[in-house]
């Protein structure tokens, strides 16, 4: 059976979503099991401004992830002072009003996936488009398409992951559309593996469908409980992307919501456990188990490539915002304003998954550094946690259409808050440029001292 493009959204097959309709009684069970998940993100926590991952030890590790401590060691003091001034955690901030936004619309950009085209489907409150991210210690410039294309000229970028990763790619295409549209140079007709080329800039973007990052197979489309069951080979490379990824200069990994589904875990070819599989004598491991192993294996691909010279980005977990029910029991996201930092906090499984991926990232970054490879953290989690207002809700389709996510509180409207991920991306690419020019300066300086 082939995954139908419209339904890949939440990892449910078309037949399953139909079945879910027919078996409303079973939906309850399914929901409770598969999607205990996302779902309940309690709101309004009174621990003012407390973000566990923003504790001081974490921010100093953010510093080292970006490698600033190297700059600060400069003995002349000049470059060091400049570096210290430059240091700012762009992921730590608040949303502030931006009357200028949006920078594209559903009629200027054709790349918006129908299910995220909230303008087309009449999302009544359009205020969600009119915010920008303001880091506490600096400004995050609004995306500049000409500058982005200048930086990536002659390069290529791959998005590896699920439909939320594709959501970012489509945002990028729309943001760049003020300068140029890409042409379709896909190698296959499979919508899950697209390639786009910016002819004037010789820049290529590709998307690789790999919601579990590792090798995965659908074992049974129906059981348990009509949600489908996947076999995950947690230590095996997914060759659909792994075999081609060394061609790319930038690789952006993302994974998330598919790990909430019932899954069987294989390691070394042996069944080691599962997540909500309901099989006798199979250990029910946690979803953090598979999430951790999947990232470990994906990063191991990168660290084992002979010819790869690119930069690897981890775009961190993107929280969903169902309230007053689970995704298929009337849960919805109807808020019309972002939260402030003191109004919500990351916790529960979302926090656990976030910390898990950060741990695997740090491990891979250390390994990569030994080989001269760069790993960077595109830490979108906090910013997105604060955006319950930016999801399609029921405006990702016409009211009479049956879709998997009745109210989609997982993906992001375009235009919308996800555009900020590309603001982050551009800022990070600019930092790479700054770092390499500083490295050149340090080198010249060292040579002068030797003379
Ligand atoms: C864009 O959205 C408007 C409503 O804001 C709608 O009338 C129009 O049909 C949409 N166009 C496309 C191409 O989706
Ligand atoms: C385009 O960029 C690729 C590297 O991504 C390079 O190999 C190729 O020569 C470039 N082509 C042109 C026409 O500049
Ligand atoms: C599960 O394990 C028990 C005890 O070892 C055994 O009696 C039973 O047959 C096993 N069930 C299956 C389905 O393998
Ligand atoms: C959050 O902080 C703002 C000011 O920064 C304040 O006006 C608001 O009352 C606070 N909200 C909560 C829930 O503490
Ligand atoms: C949507 O589901 C309802 C209830 O199951 C059914 O009656 C209707 O025909 C379906 N509509 C479409 C467009 O499939």
Image (spheres, grey):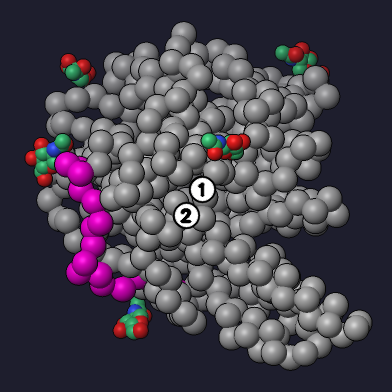
- Magenta highlight on residue 431: no
Q: How many marks?
A: 2
Would residue 52 appear left or right of 324 to someone viewing this image? right
The location of residue 246, given as percent across then percent down, is 69, 35
Say whether mark 2 is within 8 Å of ligand 2. no
Residue 381: image tag:
none
Q: Secondary structure at mark 2?
A: helix
Q: Which image quadrant shows ligand 4? A: bottom left
Does the image show residue 333? no
Determine crowd level at label 1: few under 14, some 14-19, many 20+ residues with C-alpha closer than 10 A: some
Q: Is residue 25 above or below residue 293?
A: above
Q: Identify the residue at the far front of this view.
A: 451
Pointer 2 with pointer 1, Cβ within 8 A: yes
| Residue 107 located within the stretch drawn in magenta | yes
Residue 153 has which mark? 1
Residue 186 place in picture, x, y as percent: 46, 23
Question: Viewer-proximal residue, 85 or 182?
Answer: 182
Point out which mark residue 150 bears.
2
- In the rendered view, tell whether residue 30 sits above or below residue 2: below
Extent of the magenta region = 93-108
Residue in the picture at 35% in, 48% down: 176
Measure the alpha-carbon separation of dots 2 and 1.
5 Å
Q: Report if residue 386 is visible in the image.
A: yes
């Amino acid at each position: 059976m082939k995954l139908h493009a419209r339904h890949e959204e939440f990892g449910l097959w078309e037949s399953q979503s139909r079945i879910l309709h027919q078996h409303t009684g079973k939906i309850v069970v399914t929901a409770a099991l598969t999607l205990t998940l996302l779902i309940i993100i309690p709101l309004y926590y009174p621990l003012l401004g407390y973000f566990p991952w923003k504790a001081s030890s974490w921010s100093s590790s953010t510093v080292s992830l970006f490698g600033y401590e190297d700059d600060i060691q400069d003995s002349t003091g000049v470059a060091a002072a400049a570096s210290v001034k430059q240091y700012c955690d762009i992921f730590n901030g608040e949303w502030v009003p931006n009357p200028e936004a949006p920078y594209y619309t559903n009629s200027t950009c054709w790349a918006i996936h129908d299910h995220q085209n909230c303008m087309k489907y009449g999302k009544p409150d359009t205020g969600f488009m009119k915010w920008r991210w303001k880091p506490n210690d600096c400004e995050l410039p609004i995306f500049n398409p000409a500058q982005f294309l200048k930086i990536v000229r002659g390069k290529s970028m791959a998005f590896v992951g699920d439909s939320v990763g594709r959501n970012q790619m489509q945002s990028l295409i729309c943001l760049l559309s003020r300068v140029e549209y890409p042409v379709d140079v896909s190698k296959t007709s499979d919508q899950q593996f697209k390639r786009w080329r910016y002819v004037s800039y010789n820049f290529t973007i590709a998307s690789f469908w790999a919601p579990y990052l590792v090798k995965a197979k659908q074992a049974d489309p129906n059981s348990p409980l009509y949600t489908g069951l996947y076999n995950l080979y947690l230590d095996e490379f997914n060759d659909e992307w792994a075999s081609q990824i060394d061609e790319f200069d930038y690789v952006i990994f993302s994974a998330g919501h598919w790990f909430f589904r019932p899954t069987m875990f294989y390691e070394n070819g042996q069944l080691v456990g599962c997540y909500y599989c309901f099989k006798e004598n199979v250990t029910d491991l946690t979803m953090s188990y598979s999430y951790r192993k999947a990232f470990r294996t994906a990063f191991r691909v990168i660290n084992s490539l002979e010819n790869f010279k690119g930069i690897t980005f981890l775009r961190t977990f993107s929280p969903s915002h169902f309230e007053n029910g689970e995704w298929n029991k009337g849960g919805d996201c109807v808020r019309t304003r972002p939260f402030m930092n003191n109004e919500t906090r990351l916790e529960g499984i979302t926090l656990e998954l976030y910390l898990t991926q950060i741990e695997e990232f740090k491990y891979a970054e250390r390994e990569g550094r030994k080989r001269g490879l760069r790993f960077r953290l595109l830490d979108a989690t906090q910013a997105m946690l604060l955006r319950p207002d930016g999801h399609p809700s029921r405006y990702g389709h016409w009211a009479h259409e049956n879709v998997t996510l009745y109210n989609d509180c997982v993906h992001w409207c375009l235009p919308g808050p996800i555009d900020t991920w590309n603001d982050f991306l551009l800022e990070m690419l600019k930092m790479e440029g700054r770092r390499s020019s500083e490295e050149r300066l340090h080198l010249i300086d060292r040579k002068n001292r030797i003379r």
